[in-house]
Image (spheres, helix red, strand yellow):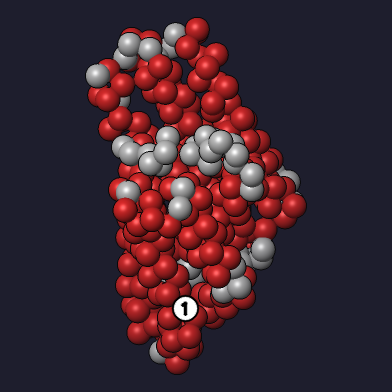
Amino acid sequence: MAADALLLPLLLVKLGLYASALIAGGLSLHAALGIVERERLAPTLAFAAAAAGLALAFSGARLVLINAQLGAGIGDAFNADNFIWTWRMQGSAALALASGALALLICLGFRSRTLMGLGALGIAASFALTGHSQALDTPGAAPWAVAVHVLIAAFWFAAPITLWPKLGLADAALVKRMERFSAWAIAPILVLFALGLWLAWRLADGVEAALSSLYGQLLLAKLLAASIALAIGAFNKQYVTKTLQASPARGRKLLTRTLSLDALLFATALTLVGWATTMTGPPGM
């Protein structure tokens, strides 16, 4: 009963962790791949480092709540005996996240695109080192499929921040950003979709379970929400970029609307994943 009472706080902490980690990873990728102009790297990296620090704080809160679940409730949140088991389950993920955050922190003073990329990789790896993919009888490639899936998702998740039509960003610079983003974004879409389907099948233990269990349905609904967001991204590439060039004022308004819808869809996908991994679980586990 005590563990059940902690499910909602754990869900909220996970959502905070997922969102801040994806923002940090996505922005670091945008910086590493040159989507953000060199002269504007400082605020982007500062935002990414702050998001990574917030992710670390949420990761610590997750450790505390899981530790409490292993005991008799919140009173056991700092129980040292329980923490041995908690760290075995979550320690590797926390360390990977910390390494990614450290790389981004170093980037604030030392602008290395390699470190920016390593920061994103560390954050993505933290998702592979915990969760239901690690609980499979034979995890195989599933955890690393999660890491690749998260890395690509983070790239898209941060798009509403990088591509937002800020007043201080000139029309020509905004168009260039969109063109650079699109050059990197389109090719991995099929990989993202294929990995999402494969992971839903693998974690739910088959097509029938993926379609009939609540867990599988939540993962498929997440994939649908993300797919719609990616379709909007394709619309931005094919139509909104041209509108920005022909009529900047109209293009900015349209881009604001599409990115707002993207952000809502990404938040929906994140909530569905959080619900699946916290409130329910794979049918066979």
| Residue lying at 40% horizontally and 41% vertically, measured from the top left | 282
Residue carrying label 1? 234
**Drawn side of residue 263 relative to residue 97, left or right:** left
At which x and y percent is residue 32? 67, 58
Above or below: residue 201 compared with residue 15 = below
Total marks placed: 1
Q: Name the quadrant containing residue 173.
A: bottom right
Above or below: residue 97 compared with residue 177 = above
Above or below: residue 168 compared with residue 132 = below
> What quarter of the picture does the C terminus occupy?
top left
At which x and y percent is residue 250? 35, 84
> What quarter of the picture does the N terminus occupy?
top left
**Drawn side of residue 63 relative to residue 177, left or right:** left
At which x and y percent is residue 98? 61, 33
**Drawn side of residue 179 relative to residue 114, left or right:** left
| Residue lying at 50% horizontally and 14% vertically, measured from the top left | 83
Residue situated in front as seen by the camera: 176 or 258: 258
Q: Name the quadrant containing residue 228.
A: bottom left
Residue situated in front as seen by the camera: 130 or 116: 130
Above or below: residue 14 compared with residue 244 = above
At which x and y percent is residue 7? 30, 30
Q: Which residue lies furthest to the bottom in this view?
A: 246
